[in-house]
Image (cartoon, rainbow, N blue to C red):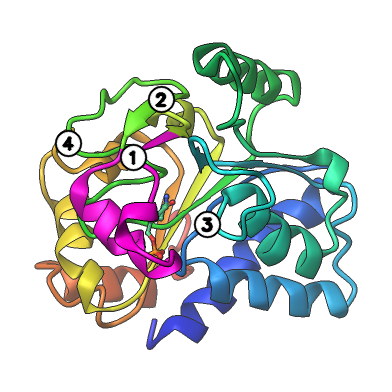
């Protein structure tokens, strides 16, 4: 894709296909800057008549210890950037509870809620510069479930821009595990910009490795990456991927 706007438009189209086929679809939603254009494009589709009112949503992650009404808590971010613009029913939207007295129990409960909803139909993902998805930092177990994690220093630095001071970035988080993400029926990862190029190349063309947590998507039977030119700049087989897209739809059965 040429740039972030095209990435968002394409990803929103994939989500719209899922919701059109199943109006009560369960979406996995991501925070961060990467999916913002996708939400924008989806909101435009909603204005054009796409019904999202019966959709349920599960956020990937949440910081530990910040109030739900703190503007940078993922409770607040998901409400502001996803629930409101898309017109979702807030009672069908869940975010892990980083304020629970018993965090381990909250994680187990989150897994149970996802299962009770019938599992996630489509999980939208961004990627961190160190290859994390959700908040599954390097060396996360490839079969991990929702749990407490300690944020990597690089992730805290990257996210410091959202807080008054770098010290205000929480040290811990709750995140769906890589195994939880793999259970989604579809995975859709969006990435833009040169700062993501190394991570994109590693997860697509490198080995499956907990050092690059997003590489676990190589094990998913229906994972799609939607990336712009800058994020694609370190892919060795970029020409081949373009070639396959050009020739998609030209299969001649029986030929
Ligand atoms: C954040 C989130 C991830 C997100 C990633 C990249 O910390 N927990 O879900 O994909 O880091 O963020 P951004 O899209 O802003 O680059």
Q: Which residues are magenta?
A: 151-173
- The relative height of residue 188 versus residue 177 in the rendered view (above or below) is below
Write down the residue under mark 1: 171
In front: label 1 or label 2: 1
Left or right: residue 208 compared with residue 49: left
Q: Nearer the viewer, residue 173 or 252?
A: 173
Q: Residue at x 61, y 62 (%)?
A: 14
Q: Earlier in the sequence, mark 1 or mark 2?
A: 2
Q: CA distance from mark 3 to mark 2?
A: 18 Å
Say whether marks 4 and 3 touch (CB < 8 Å). Answer: no
Q: Earlier in the sequence, mark 4 or mark 3?
A: 3
Residue 16 visible, this angle? no
Instruction: Answer yes or no: disc 4 within 8 Å of ligand 1.
Output: no
Q: Classify 10 Å Cα crowding around label 4: few (below 14), some (14-19), many (20 and above).
A: some
Q: Position of residue 1 (x, y in %)?
A: 39, 81
Q: Nearer the viewer, residue 82 or 232?
A: 82
Q: Earlier in the sequence, mark 2 or mark 4?
A: 2
In front: label 4 or label 1: 1
Q: Position of residue 71 (x, y in %)?
A: 61, 60
Q: Nearer the viewer, residue 164 or 200?
A: 164
Q: Residue at x 44, y 70 (%)?
A: 250
* The image quadrant in which ligand 1 is located: bottom left
Q: Classify 10 Å Cα crowding around label 2: few (below 14), some (14-19), many (20 and above).
A: many
Q: Position of residue 234 (x, y in %)?
A: 12, 71
Left or right: residue 78 compared with residue 169: right
Write down the residue under mark 2: 148
Left or right: residue 50 compared with residue 224: right
Write down the residue under mark 3: 31
Instruction: Answer yes or no: disc 3 within 8 Å of ligand 1.
Output: yes
């Amino acid at each position: 894709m040429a740039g972030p706007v095209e990435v968002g438009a394409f990803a929103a189209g994939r989500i719209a296909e899922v919701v059109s086929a199943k109006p009560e679809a369960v979406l996995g939603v991501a925070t961060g800057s990467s999916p913002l254009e996708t939400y924008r494009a989806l909101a435009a589709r909603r204005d054009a008549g796409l019904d999202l009112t019966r959709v349920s949503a599960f956020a990937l992650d949440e910081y530990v210890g910040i109030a739900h009404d703190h503007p940078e808590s993922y409770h607040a971010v998901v409400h502001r950037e996803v629930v409101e613009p898309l017109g979702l029913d807030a009672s069908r939207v869940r975010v892990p509870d980083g304020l629970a007295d018993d965090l381990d129990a909250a994680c187990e409960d989150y897994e149970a809620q996802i299962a009770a909803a019938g599992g996630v139909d489509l999980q939208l993902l961004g990627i961190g510069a160190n290859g994390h998805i959700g908040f599954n930092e390097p060396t996360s177990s490839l079969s991990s479930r929702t749990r407490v994690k300690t944020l990597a220093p690089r992730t805290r630095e990257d996210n410091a821009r959202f807080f008054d001071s770098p010290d205000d970035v929480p040290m811990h988080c709750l995140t769906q595990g890589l195994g939880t993400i793999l259970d989604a029926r579809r995975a859709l990862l969006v990435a833009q910009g040169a700062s993501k190029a190394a991570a994109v190349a590693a997860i697509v063309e490198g080995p499956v490795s907990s050092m690059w947590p997003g590489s676990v998507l190589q094990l998913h039977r229906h994972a799609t990456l939607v990336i712009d030119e800058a994020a694609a700049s370190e892919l060795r087989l970029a020409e081949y991927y373009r070639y396959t897209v050009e020739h998609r739809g030209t299969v001649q059965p029986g030929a």
